[in-house]
Amino acid sequence: MTSLRLLLVLVLLQFAGLLAWQDYKDYKVFELKPQDANQLELLRRLAREQPHWDILGTRRSYNESGLRVLVAPNQVNSLLKQLKTHHIEHQLLWNDMSLLLRQQRAENELSKSRSALPFIDVLGGFYTHAEINEYLKSLPQRYPQRALLKQFGRSYEGRALKLLTINNGDGRPNKPVILIDATMHAREWIAPSFALYIIQQLLDHNVEHADLLQDYDWVIMPVVNADGYEFTHTDSRYWRKTRKPTWDPENIGTDLNRNFGYEWGHDEGSSADPAEEIYRGEHAFDQPESQVVRDVLLHYSDRLDFYLSLHSYGNYLLLPWGHTSAFPSNYFDMMEVADAGAMAIVQATNGIYSYGSGYHLMYPTSGDSTDYAVGVANATVAITMELPAGGFLGFDPWVSHIEGIVTESWVGVRAMALEVIRRYQTRS
Ligand SMILES: [Zn+2]
């Protein structure tokens, strides 16, 4: 983009009053290089004690790369002191996050300005919750026989939570269901983009994908954490949780993916402290958004063959259980579905996914949605898909990277869906 265009977009943003935005001026990014499992554990403990350090990355073992910390300017000295005391290798990667974010914001606004609602160019920008709803609302008019839009509830701040049912128009009721949700975590912007891409594939390219729709209905909810997602567009790009206040006036928001009511509340895999990013809420389902996902799961529970929850990042296909090292009874069937997805992706793009139980592959989670889907809502297969990293911190791909990520991911989701259909369609 020319600097003149960039300047113009910035001026427009300013007029639009959008610079209530936390600009991350002088926020720094360090790459941390723990040398052994003890140092990794120590970093995790320090991060828990220092809520101002946002340690990002999903790395589980010390010999994988990619552990980064985003730190406010007034916290830099204390971080460096701790790293020095504990002899943890580190490197300054980025001196001022505001420059990167400003550039990304301008790129997105300029790119989106080329298409007019209700039409959206999924590959050309990251859309807000309101823009996505506008687009979803237009679909039943464009595809009256094949698209049905429902609302199951509202977010804490009153945003309508919509889900779209897609079928092939043959009028056969009560087909088994493939249910996909996205954006439980607000900052994971590639997740709603991918959900929208799936919708467009199934609606606009329905002939090509007739095999996916012949015996199954697809139900897709692109934005679960609508308030948090909106907040990442208007205020703070790296917000993860919801926006409902907690009992602690200092801290807002709950991690929706620790708020589901199956084996909820374990300290291994969630936190009772609202300062933490994995705060689980005061009670299971005390967030309106997790209630909506619960209601949708239960609504389809007698025909739910595949539940897929889209997150980023890390290239993982995470199966239940998250809360225990044990395995669900059909774990190896689920593994074969994940295997089909991972193999299709590696063949298509050489992209590498790891797959297995969340507890073993990543870290324990208590109260997550896939555990609930299998433990309570009777889902045959449930998978959390951690899409590839992008941008500088993993959650922030450039607009120019959307196409590569979503087209690759679609290869995997299509293959997993076909494997589910192959294994279970005879029941319909
Ligand atoms: Zn997530």
Image: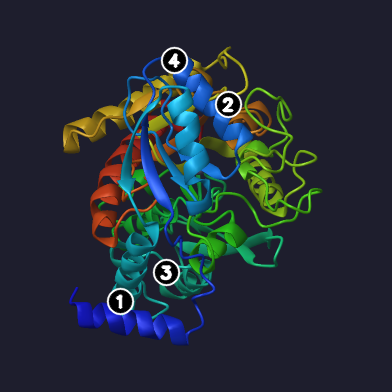
Q: Is residue 5 above or below residue 45?
A: below
The image's mark for residue 37 is 4
Is tag 2's residue or tag 4's residue first in the polypeptide sequence?
A: 4
Q: Earlier in the sequence, mark 1 or mark 2?
A: 2
Task: Kindly state the secondary structure of the residue where label 3 is placed.
Answer: loop
Q: Nearer the viewer, residue 418 or 38?
A: 38
Residue tagged by mark 2? 45
**Could you say whether the residue bearing mark 1 is in a helix, strand or loop?**
helix
Vertical position of residue 55 compared to residue 145: above or below: above
Residue of label 1 = 110
Quadrant in which residue 161 is drawn: bottom right
- Mark 4, ligand 1, within 8 Å: the answer is no
Circle 4: is it few (<14), some (14-19), or many (20+) Cα within 10 Å? few
- How is the structure coloured here? rainbow
Q: Secondary structure at mark 2?
A: helix
**Mark 3 touches mark 1? (CB < 8 Å):** no
Is 342 displayed left or right of 86 in the figure? Answer: left
Q: Nearer the viewer, mark 3 or mark 1?
A: 1
Distance from Cα at disc 1 to Cα at disc 2? 41 Å
How many C-alpha atoms fall within 10 Å of the one at disc 2: few (<14), some, or many (≥20)? Answer: few
First-in-chain label (3 vs 4):
4
Question: Where is residue 356 drawn, in percent x and y?
Answer: 43, 21
Q: Earlier in the sequence, mark 1 or mark 4?
A: 4
> Dot 3 corresponds to which residue?
143
Whether ligand 1 has any atom under 8 Å from the Cβ at mark 2 is answered as no
Give the amino acid at mark 1. Leu
Q: Nearer the viewer, mark 2 or mark 3?
A: 2
User: Is residue 416 left or right of 288 when viewed as pictured?
Assistant: left
Residue type at tag 2: Arg
Q: Nearer the viewer, residue 334 or 300?
A: 334
Query: Residue 57's x, y, as percent?
Result: 42, 36
Q: Residue at x 35, y 57 (%)?
A: 197
